[in-house]
Amino acid sequence: MFTKILFATSATKESDHAARVAFNIAGSYDAHLDIFHVPGVPSRGYSQVVVDVKTKERVDVDDDYLEWVKDEIRTYYAKYLENGLRYDITVAIGFPAREILRQAKDTEPDLILLGGSTGDEEEAVYKKSMAGTTLQKIARSAKCPVLVVNRPAASFWGGLSNITFGTDFSKASDKAFEFAMKVAKNLDCELNVFHALDITSGATGEMLSQDEIEQKIREALRMIRGRYESRLKELKHYSMDVWEGIPFIEIVKYARDIHSDLIVMAHHSKKTEKADAILGSNVEQVIVRAGCPVISVNR
Amino acid sequence: MHEFLTGIFFWFAITVCLVGMLVRFVLYFRGLSWQLDRVAYKAHPKAGMKGAFRSIYKWLIPYGTYGWRTQPFMAAAFFGFHIGAVVVPLFLSAHNIFLENKVGFSLFTLNAGVADFLTWLAVVCAFFLILRRIVLPEVRILTTLYDYFILFIALAPFLTGLTARYHVGDYSFWLNLHIFCGELLLIAIPFTKMSHVFLFFASRAQLGMDFGIKRGGMKGTKMAW
Amino acid sequence: MPEGKYCNKTPVNTPEEVNFLLSDTSGNQYYKEMKNLEVDSDLLWATIQKTLKSRLRTWLEICAHCGMCADSCFLYLVNDRDPKQVPAYKIQSTLGEIIKRKGKVDNAFMRHAMEVAWAQCTCCNRCGTYCPHGIDTGIMFGYLRGLLYQQGFVPWEMKIGAGMHRAYRAQMDVTNEDFVETFEWMVEENEEEYIGLTVPVDVENADIMYTVNAREVKHYPEDLAEAAILFHAAGENWTVPSEGWEQTSLAMFAGDWAACKMQVESVYAAMEKLKPKRMIGTECGHAHRATVIEGPYWAGRENGLPPVESIHYVEWLAEALREGKLKIDPSKRIRELVTMQDSCNYVRNQGLKNATREIMSHIVEPGYFVEMSPNKEHNFCCGGGGGFNGIGLFRKQRNKGLEKKRDQILATGAKLVLAPCHNCWDAIRDLEEEFKIGIRWSFLKPIIIKMLVLPDHMKPEE
Ligand code: HEM
Ligand code: HEM
Ligand code: SF4
Ligand code: SF4
């Protein structure tokens, strides 16, 4: 399933839930884990000074500093690193999203795992140059699935039993579906295909009547069947559902309702990102709100 | 004494002043280096000339530049003093009568009232320039004894000229002193900061060429002085 | 102990030497050694005699000590009108003094001169336009920096910066491979959203050769993508050189004239090799000044011009908008109060004041653009020019220097500041960090891309 995982971490407790998942997945697939950390954001013009993301203090970057940071990480994750895990620790200076993507370009992992960087406190430092958040950037540009763990994950990777796949029938969604299928098969769990009918006035232009809504729900269900059912039959358990509302809210509600322990969605580079740059796209909203880990798939 | 001052010494002073100015003027422009100054003077003479004239012209009119406009008090004192300092020695009728006798030609002459007025104006403005040096901290820190010395040799002909003009005290003493001071000033011009009388034009022309050639002039932006 | 391990008179030339100097955290040791660095008075005086020609000599001589330049200097204004910050005083008490003493000055004097040259003047050239004699103190400080650099009295970061140019022909440790690779990567990242996006490397006879700031490659590669998107949308036939792509010159701020020459010659060589019709540089002020305005003189070009016509990014943008090569969706124009920073390096050094305003007229809803006061060629320095932004030793002075720009921005009432210059952008960012006045700041590229009407061939299919 996975052979090379890039785990981007803040190496603080904000990333602890993600760390648990990361070491768990790497362990279960005997994958190589690249523990990646960006300790500092460039500051002071062209000089070598960075703002330390933890202390917010200015530090000079030199080899000693970078070695020290690596040691800190090694100590922080010591208990996970004992059991013969194959891993690297890499640190780089720069803007986190950019450096994570750079690392991904160089090492070509088949999963990027992020944690803890959606909260606000780090954004203060990170936002300095980036329009949008670290997460937005990575989800948009990564070539492999991006798994984000924001809250404590209820189950370990191996124990996943119920996956929600949210679709909007785009090409990217087809890619995400393939990935969801792969995981469901691999872990032998239930896959629930879900579509949220966007009835916000921004999307439809006017208030829909109840009849129209139900009509559209039927259409969407037909589309799900047409598009995915033949493949879904390869699984033991699956379901298909369409709810109406504000898409990201509905997906989160749905996943909670059916006790999903993973959500898979496509990330769109489509204009949504610009239209509501503050809210971010659906998937970003889901990530922030969902109780379980979310995987965003792009291509 | 009078003989000496209006004779040999007069010629000496005039020659030193004129030759000195000429030499320094030539040396100035010969000392410009396109590469060290980073201005391609020779390659773009037209743009350079345009910039040079514009920069001189703008600064010679009161309130013609932002510099003058932001400092109205200074501008008033400067022009008040300098109009007198330049016009009176050149066009005073007494000076021109002297010149007529000496070399046989004279320039346009000022009417006496105007000359008196300009002279008094210059003296009063010079007083304010001195006051400024004492009162304003940003000028005080720059001021050296040398600056007062320059003010002194620039003012001396005015004060002595006025004393002679109003026949205060011993006329011939004051007249002789006046002529001596005037000649001293002439001699000082090429060798002291008084060289600004002509080097002002050189320096302004240089910066004008800089702006005219390199710093926007050739792209059609005139510097808003 | 005259010459130190870190602090000495020898320029830094190789990556190894740069790294060695970098290994001295914050330059602590470097500055300690500087206290013992010997002044080579003979060399100093000989250099002065060779290079101090009539322009500077006359300036120093005829300065009327009138103090009219005082109010023109933002550092004088923000430091409570400290008379020691009067431009004429600053230069007379340093360069003037060295000359008066025929180069026989001591170590303490040189260190003081270093502080004045880098922490009390950003070489913004504003005072030069307010002096009745046309005395440009900024230029003289540039000259003084050269003398100080030669003697080894130069801030640590500046020595490194100049060394980077010597070692990499770039202001940061970015190699030619890094540059091309990063550009390609950025294009790849965006090619799905912008169909047909490419980065043409080393194409001969293109209409445009584009040059950048190494910082973009290292930390802000989005900027490269944005440049590609805009050139592509405008239908330009453009290219980037795989060598000679760095337009900036920290060596200019350091006073390392030899390195300035090396740097700019690498760009000119690219021009000569690729023979583009024009060279366009990124949104950077000092880069334009270094490569387009001063560069020809370092390279010994008697006509004072680069080998091919070279313009600033804002000039190209203005042209592209004017000619309709780039189309703006009027409904997406900026509809909030917005102001713009004029970079000293191109507004007072090449008069580029109209291009930026023309751009504003295209991208800002009428009535929403507010000028700073004063503006155009009378604008104040951002507060971080001339290398000031990056010098740790003088951070406090720099932060103080930001106050003028802060007050200018506050007076406009705008919350968005457009800064088409890396240095200004940095200073304004730091200003927000320092004073928290609640502003946002941006280069022009990302703002324009947001409101661009993409040509059909670039739109992804749905
Ligand atoms: C070089 C030799 C000079 C000679 C022979 C000379 C001669 C004279 C004479 C004969 C008078 C008339 C005094 C009277 O009214 O009876 C006079 C007045 C005056 N001179 Fe000179 N002068 C000389 C240089 C200068 C210079 C260099 C200046 C100024 C920079 C100057 C400024 C004046 C002034 C201000 C007056 C009085 C004007 C008035 O209020 O009427 N003189 N000078
Ligand atoms: C066309 C000729 C002249 C020009 C363009 C000129 C220009 C200037 C300028 C630009 C200044 C500096 C600004 C200032 O301090 O006011 C200055 C200062 C001065 N000039 Fe002249 N000047 C000229 C002739 C003269 C003459 C003929 C005298 C003396 C009789 C003179 C005496 C002075 C003095 C004493 C100062 C220093 C003023 C101070 O202490 O503030 N200048 N001049
Ligand atoms: S304004 Fe010019 S002449 Fe006056 S003090 Fe300043 S540099 Fe000197
Ligand atoms: S160049 Fe700028 S910073 Fe330097 S003295 Fe002049 S006004 Fe001040």
Image (cartoon, rainbow, N blue to C red):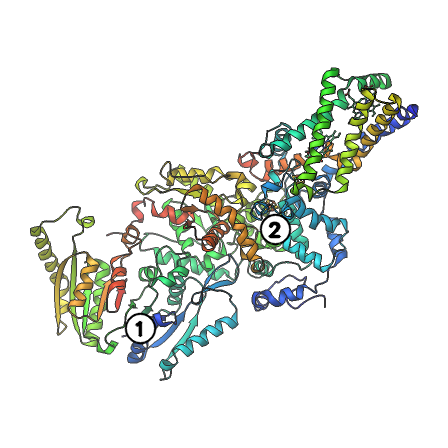
Using the image as rendered, state which of residue C298 and residue B154 is in the foreground: B154
Residue B49: tell me if it is visible: no
Using the image as rendered, state which of residue C345 and residue C365 is in the foreground: C365
> Could you say where residue C177 lies in the image, as x and y percent from the top left?
48, 61
Residue farthest to the bottom, as pictured = A83
Q: Which mark is residue C134?
A: none
Residue of label 2: C120
Task: Look at the numbered discs 1 and 2 and tell me whether their residues touch, using CB distance below 8 Å.
Answer: no
Residue of label 1: A17
Q: Quadrant of the N terminus of chain A?
A: bottom left
Q: Is residue A271 left or right of residue C446?
A: left
Q: Secondary structure at mark 2?
A: loop
Q: Judge if badges 1 and 2 mark residues of a common chain.
A: no
Using the image as rendered, state which of residue C13 and residue A77 is in the foreground: A77
Q: Quadrant of ligand 1?
A: top right
Instruction: Identify whether B31 is placed above or below A97.
Output: above
Q: Residue at x 38, y 61 (%)?
A: A123
> Could you say where residue C107 lies in the image, as x and y percent from the top left?
71, 60
State which chain disc 1 sits on. Answer: A
Using the image as rendered, state which of residue B78 and residue A236 is in the foreground: B78
Dot 2 amino acid type: Gln
